[in-house]
Structures are given as C-alpha cells and as structure tokens.
Amino acid sequence: MDFEKLTSVLRRLSLDAGDRIMEIYNSDDFEVRAKSDDSPVTAADEVADALISAGLAEAFPNVLVVTEEQAASHTATADEFLIVDPLDGTKEFVQRRGDFTVNIAYVVNGVPVRGVVYAPAKKRLFYTLADGQSVEETGDFERDMVGPIQPMIVSEPDNAALMVVASKSHRDQATDDYIAKYDVKDMTSAGSSLKFCLVATGEADLYPRLGRTMEWDTAAGDAVLRGAGGEMIRYDDHTPFTYGKAGYENPFFIAYAPGVDLHPA
C-alpha cells in the first residue's frame, strides 16, 4: 500500500462526504427510515456511502471495500481491506446534535493501521499520516492543501482522577457499573467515534463500551487511537482487539491510554 496516497485519498473523501452530509443536515427536512435492525438511515448515509465507495474503488481497485450501508453484500473477508462507516452517529444526526462522523480505515491482518475520522458539524478532522502518527488538522480543510496539523498523543493518566468518556446514545447500567469501579475525576458523553478521538487527544483516559458495535463503527477511531499511542482490547479477556471477523460484529471493548489500571478494586 502507498501510504502517502492512502492518507491523501482518505482525507479528501472524508471531507467530500462531510460536505454532502452537511448539505442534508442543514436542509429544512430529511427523511429518516428504519433498516432491518431498526437502526435509522437517512439520505446522508446513502449519499456519503456511494461517494466514498466509488472513490476508494477508483483509487484502490484491488482492495476489498466494506461499508455499513452495503454490509449485507459483504460475505468475504481478506487480509487487507478498507472499512467505512459513512455516517456514524445517525441518531445524533437526526436529532441535530452534531456528534456524527465520517469514518474510513485500512485494516491489515486484523489491525486498523490507518484511518480518518471527520466530524463535519464540529469541524474536527483526525487522521493518521503515512508514517502512522495521528494528527488533528485545523483550518479551512482545503482539498489541495493540508492545514495546520497537531500531533495527537494520549494522556498520562492519573488513576486517582481519571477522565472517562462514554456513549451519549447507548449508555446502560452495565457500563455505569463498570465505570463506577474507577476513581473518576470527570466524565463526558460524546456520540459516534468521537469518543476514540477524545482519548487519542488526551481529553479523556478511558472509553469502555459494553454494548453491540460493528467493525465499521470502531475501525477508524481505533486506528487514530493507536496512532496516538492508545490501545484497544476486548472487555472479556483483555486480549488484542481484531478486525475481519465473520459478520464484522465486535465484542465489548475498552479503549484507553496506557497507564490506566484495568483491574480496579
């Protein structure tokens, strides 16, 4: 893989998809339909999916592309693939809360090695460079010129005063019970894959998820987190978190900055 090209393509496609999403987000009204699993889908999901899928197929014709909106047609797995959630946080989008993201990741041998997370309503853009380092770009997000970039690095956590981030739309008692085991200084809620990015920037130390997710929900955020020095493990046995599983369904997980005591009293 040409990682310079990959970084450029993922950045551009996420920005282009973000523009299309915001056109619909800022419109007077948009239709919300239910998918077979009762989760919501809008025209923004579908337009962004088509745009990103076409762009990736053109740029990387020999690489498998897996997207949320076309998941039913994906039965094969591969040692390397691109995985896309064109609009993560559709509930946040529908409620016009702004915490939604465009997500694209490149997975090799089960590990998301590169990725981009773009939150168009919040104007925050996170991605991995060709060398794997994660950065946040600011500025006007010009297509032909990269703006100021700030390297991302996870926090050095204080286990007596942890910063925890949790889901805004999917909080449950099991998650609250798990968080209660820690000494928490402060807690914040965020939607979509922004939670990974808050750990990656050092704005949070710990993000546990004791609920159902799919690989396209987590791969890009996971890549950004790893590129900032963070880690992600399975909740049940603390083994490494992997991708390319049959059905693309995830187990529960813990995303965190190294140094967090994962065996609280």
Image (tube, rainbow, N blue to C red):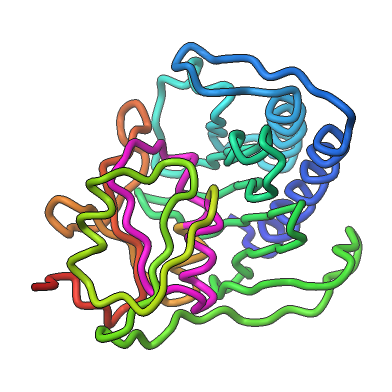
Residue 50 rendering spot, x and y as whole percentages? 73, 27
What residue is at 35 percent from the left and 68 percent from the top?
206
Q: Residue at 69% of width from left, 52% of height from top? A: 10
Question: Can you name the residue that lies furthest to the left here?
Answer: 265
Horizontal and vertical percent for residue 189? Answer: 49, 58
Quadrant position of residue 165: bottom left
| In this rendering, position of residue 197 left or right of residue 25 | left
Q: Relative to the observer, which residue lies in front, 45 or 159?
A: 159
Residue 93 is a magenta residue: no
Residue 96 vs 99, above or below: the answer is above
Q: In the drawing, does residue 194 fall left or right of residue 141?
A: left
User: Does 126 sit above or below residue 81?
Assistant: below
Of the pair 190 and 84, the residue shown nearer to us = 190
Q: Residue at the top extreme?
A: 36
Residue 169, position in %: x, y? 48, 42
Whether residue 195 appears in magenta in the rendering, the answer is: yes
Location of the C terminus (image quadrant): bottom left
Q: Quadrant of the N terminus?
A: bottom right
- Counting from the top left corner in percent of width and height, residue 257 is at 36, 75
Instruction: Specify whether 99 is left or right of 219.
Output: right
Front-lying residue, 178 or 114: 178
Q: Which residues are magenta?
A: 193-221
Of residues 61 and 96, the one drawn nearer to the viewer in this rendering: 96
How many numbered discs?
0
* In the image, residue 189 above or below residue 21: below
